[in-house]
Amino acid sequence: MSVCIKDQIQNLNIVIGCTVGCPYCYARNNVNRWHMIDDFAKPEFFPSKLRLMEKQKPQNFLLTGMSDLAVWKREWLDQVFTKIADNPQHQFLFLSKRPDLMDIDTDLENAWFGVTVTRRSELWRIDALRENVRARHYHVTFEPLFDDPGEGELRGIGWIVVGTMTGVQSKKIHTEPAWAYSLTGQAHALDIPVFMKEDLVPIIGEENMVQEMPEEFNIVLGEQKKWHK
Ligand code: SF4
């Protein structure tokens, strides 16, 4: 039975807001609906949430569920990086659609920097990520897949996620199973783990789902289970 990625990786929205302006942005809808901040186009930092990064129970955290790393101010990044370094029990993930705007150097062992690719014309983001973010771990999220991304250059990538559109806009989007299989094959040829999100089940079938995580994330999940005993 496939698992939900939100059970494996929890959102910690330490920054809310984004200026990238994707038309399908679900975060903007949620932020506006619940009035989390005054203006989604003016990102805000919530330093009070830094203490949540200190909890001892290990977790995999996504820190950009309602933002994009490229729009973070340097001083926000510095504070978050300090907390990441001080809390090696966790793994931390970041995502961006504008790696061309970033310039980051870090040797953090437990930080994963990723880009979202939704179509072939966005494959450049993977190269821009490797060029502009000098880090130990990279990942790529192919979601929502709007067309066949073709051959991606996945050298040095530590994890890929594949998914389709969810919610009210899902009826307008068709993701071909072949696109997911192609990405899976390309990743596996390089020994890169692949995680198909649960929204692919109706498209490719439960029996064809691949849900692999990097070893570092699996260690966190294993440690979590010990806390429940
Ligand atoms: S980059 Fe992410 S948070 Fe920003 S507008 Fe696009 S989908 Fe929304």
Image (cartoon, rainbow, N blue to C red):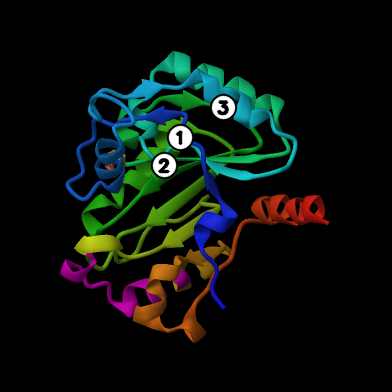
Picture quadrant where residue 197 is located: bottom left
Look at mark 2 in the image and give the residue it sits on. Answer: 65
Local crowd size for mark 3, using a 10 Å CA cut-off: few (<14), some (14–19), many (≥20): few
* In the image, the residue with mark 3 has its CB under 8 Å from the nearest atom of ligand 1: no
* Picture residue at 46% right of the left edge, 26% below the top: 104
Nearest to N terminus: mark 1 or mark 2: 1
User: Does the magenta segment cover residue 163?
Assistant: no
Nearest to N terminus: mark 3 or mark 1: 1
**Which quarter of the frame holds ligand 1?**
top left
Given residues 168 and 153, the one toward you in this image is 168
Q: CA distance from mark 1 to mark 2?
A: 6 Å
Picture quadrant where residue 49 is located: top right
Q: Residue 149: horizontal and vertical position, in percent?
A: 29, 63
Q: Are marks 1 and 2 in contact (CB under 8 Å)?
A: yes
Residue 46 is left or right of residue 112, and the answer is left
Q: Residue 110: horizontal and vertical position, in percent?
A: 64, 38
Look at mark 1 in the image and give the residue it sits on. Answer: 13
Q: For the residues carrying marks 2 and 3, which lies nearer the camera in this image? A: 2
Above or below: residue 134 compared with residue 2: above
Q: CA distance from mark 2 to mark 3?
A: 21 Å
- Tell me the SS state at disc 2: loop
Q: Residue 183: horizontal and vertical position, in percent?
A: 41, 68
Magenta region, main secondary structure: helix
From which residue to which does the magenta span run?
170-184
* Picture residue at 46% right of the left edge, 71% below the top: 184
Q: Amino acid at mark 2?
A: Gly
Look at mark 3 in the image and give the residue it sits on. Answer: 106
**Residue 23 circle label:** none
Q: Residue 223: horizontal and vertical position, in percent?
A: 77, 51
Q: Amino acid at mark 1?
A: Asn
- Tell me the SS state at disc 1: loop
